[in-house]
Image (tube, helix red, strand yellow):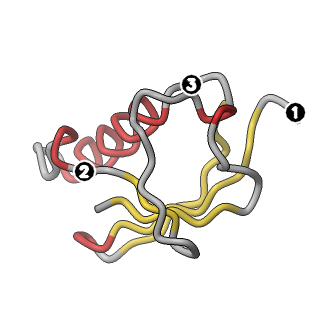
Amino acid sequence: MDNKVLIECFIPYIETTQELYVPVNKKIGTLRDLIIKSINQEAGYDYLKSSFYTFYNKDTGKNYDMNKLIIESDIRNGTRLILL
């Protein structure tokens, strides 16, 4: 499974953690939008607005550029992200 990585995403606003397999050829901003879209669909209304949130590495505190591809970042299997 070289084209996907398993990440853990913590979303403090709704106090939940999701584990996801994500394709490495997608932009980090696209990943953010997909996660927020799934949360909003589950809630049944626009619970979160995607443009206000960004990813941080839970271990290092690094902020990720939303325009970079996942493969161009240090996101690898087991990376723990926070969506703030």
Q: Is residue 70 left or right of residue 34?
A: right
Q: Amino acid at mark 1?
A: Asp
Q: Residue at x 28, y 62 (%)?
A: 84
* Residue ID at (32%, 50%): 54
Relative horizontal placement of residue 4, taking residue 26 as reference (left or right): right
Asked whether the beta carbons under mark 2 and mark 1 sit within 8 Å of each other, the answer is no
Q: Are marks 2 and 3 in contact (CB under 8 Å)?
A: no
Q: Earlier in the sequence, mark 2 or mark 3?
A: 3
Q: Quadrant of the N terminus?
A: top right
| Residue drawn where x is 50% and y is 27% of the image | 27
Q: Earlier in the sequence, mark 1 or mark 3?
A: 1
Which disc is residue 2 wearing?
1
Quote the CA–CA distance across marks 2 and 1. Answer: 28 Å
- Residue type at mark 2? Tyr
Q: Is residue 72 above or below residue 5?
A: above
Callout 3, which amino acid?
Lys
Q: Position of residue 53 (x, y in %)?
A: 24, 50
In screen coordinates, is 55 left or right of 80? left
Vertical side of 84 occupied by 22: above or below: above
Tell me the element at label 3: loop
**Depth check, front residue: 22 or 63:** 63
Under circle 2, the secondary element is: loop
Residue ID for mark 3? 26
Q: Earlier in the sequence, mark 2 or mark 1?
A: 1
Where residue 83 sits, quadrant-wise, is: bottom left
Residue at the limit of the structure toward the right, as seen here: 1
Q: Which residue is mark 2?
A: 53
Q: Is residue 7 above or below residue 70?
A: below
Between the C-alphas of marks 2 and 3, the distance is 17 Å
Looking at the rendering, which quadrant does residue 22 occupy? Answer: top right
